[in-house]
Amino acid sequence: MVTIRSKKSIGFTCFLLFVMLTNSSILGISAAEPLHHQDQGLGENAESRDLKKEHEHIHEVHCSRERSRAAWEIVEKYLMHFVERERYEISRNCRLHPDNDLFRDQENHKIKEDVNEWQCGYCKKSFLSEEFIDRHFDSRHYNLLNFTGSKCLADLCGALHCDHVLGSKSPRAKCNPAAAARNRHLCESLADACFPVSQGPSASRLHELFLQQFCYAHTCTGGIKPFSKGGRKETSVLYFAASVLTLMLLPLFYVLVCLHQSETRKDTQELKRISRLGRKAKPM
C-alpha cells in the first residue's frame, strides 16, 4: 500500500515538473517574440527618425527656382549685352540687379562638368542632373539664401516673357487684356527704375531699348514680338570646333601653296634651260 502511494506521489511530482517546464518554455518563446518585435520597432523608428531629419532640412521657398532661372537667362541674353556695350552700371535699386536674385549665389556655385554631371561649388558633391543639385541646394545650403527685401526674380516673369521662352504658354491661348496691361505696367516700372532717363544719354538709350525689347510686346493687338532688338549671340560648339580646325589647317595650306609655287618656278627654269640648249644646238 505504501509502495503504491509512493509511486503515485512520484508520478504526480513528475507531472507537475513536466507542466512547469512546458509553461516556462512557452513563456520563454512569448517573451522572446516581444523582444524581437521591440528590436524591429527600434530599427524602424531609427529609419523614420533619419528620414524625418532629412526632410527637416528641406525648407519651403515661396519662389520658383526654375522661373527665376529663366528670368535671369532672359536678362543675360537680351539685356546685359546692351548694358555692357553702354558701360552702364545697374543700380541695386533695380530689381534686375544680381544682388536682388534670391538664387543667384547658389546658381553661381553650380558647376556643369558634363551633360549628366553637375557639381556643387560649396561642398564639391556630384549630381546626375540639375534637378538633383537644385534639391541639394534646397536641403543643404538653404542658409545661403538671402531673403531680405524683394528677392524673387520669378515675380518679374510676366514682364520678361518667361512663358514665351519656357514654352509654357500655348500660342493658341487667348490674350487677356487685363493681364497684358498689368505686365506692361510692371515692365515700364522696371524700365523707369533700372534706367532713369535723368541719368544721361546711356540710361535714356537703355530705357528705350528696354521698352522695345520687353514692354511694347505686352499687347493683345499683335504684330509686336518680344526681344525685337535681338540678343547676345551664343557661340556653338560646332562653330568653335570649325574655327580651331581652320586655324590649324591654315598654316598647312600656306606651306602647300609655297611648295607648289617653288616647284612651278623650278619647272619654268628647267624649260627655259632646255629651250636655250635647243637654240644653241641649231647652227650645227
Image: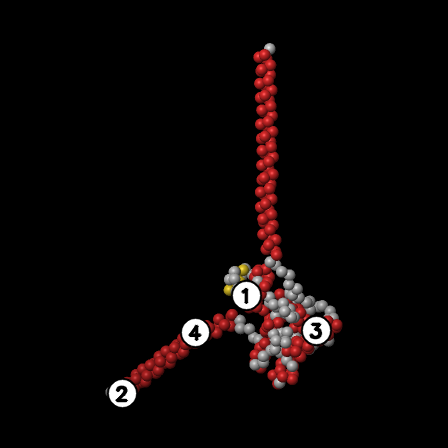
Callout 1 environment at 10 Å: few (<14), some (14 to 19), or many (20+)?
A: some
Q: Amino acid at mark 2?
A: Lys
Q: Earlier in the sequence, mark 1 or mark 4?
A: 1
Q: Earlier in the sequence, mark 3 or mark 1?
A: 1
Q: Amino acid at mark 1?
A: Lys
Say which element carries label 4. Answer: helix
Residue at far left of view:
284
Q: Which quadrant: the N terminus? A: top right
Measured in 3D between alpha carbons, the distance from the residue under mark 3 to the one under mark 1, in whole angstroms, is: 31 Å
Number of the front mark, 1 or 4: 1
Q: Is 218 placed left or right of 234 in the picture?
A: right
Residue occupying image coordinates x 71% and y 68%: 172
Q: Earlier in the sequence, mark 2 or mark 3?
A: 3
Q: Earlier in the sequence, mark 3 or mark 4?
A: 3
Q: Which residue is mark 2?
A: 280
Number of the front mark, 3 or 4: 3
Callout 3 environment at 10 Å: few (<14), some (14 to 19), or many (20+)?
A: many
Number of the front mark, 2 or 1: 1
Measured in 3D between alpha carbons, the distance from the residue under mark 3 to the one under mark 4, in whole angstroms, is: 51 Å
Q: Which quadrant: the C terminus? A: bottom left
Residue 228 visible? The answer is: no
Residue 183 is labelled as 3
Number of the front mark, 3 or 1: 1
Percent coordinates x, y for residue 270 in the rendering: 31, 82
Measured in 3D between alpha carbons, the distance from the residue under mark 4 to the one under mark 2, in whole angstroms, is: 50 Å
Q: Earlier in the sequence, mark 2 or mark 1?
A: 1
Residue occupying image coordinates x 61% and y 74%: 97
Residue occupying image coordinates x 65% and y 65%: 63
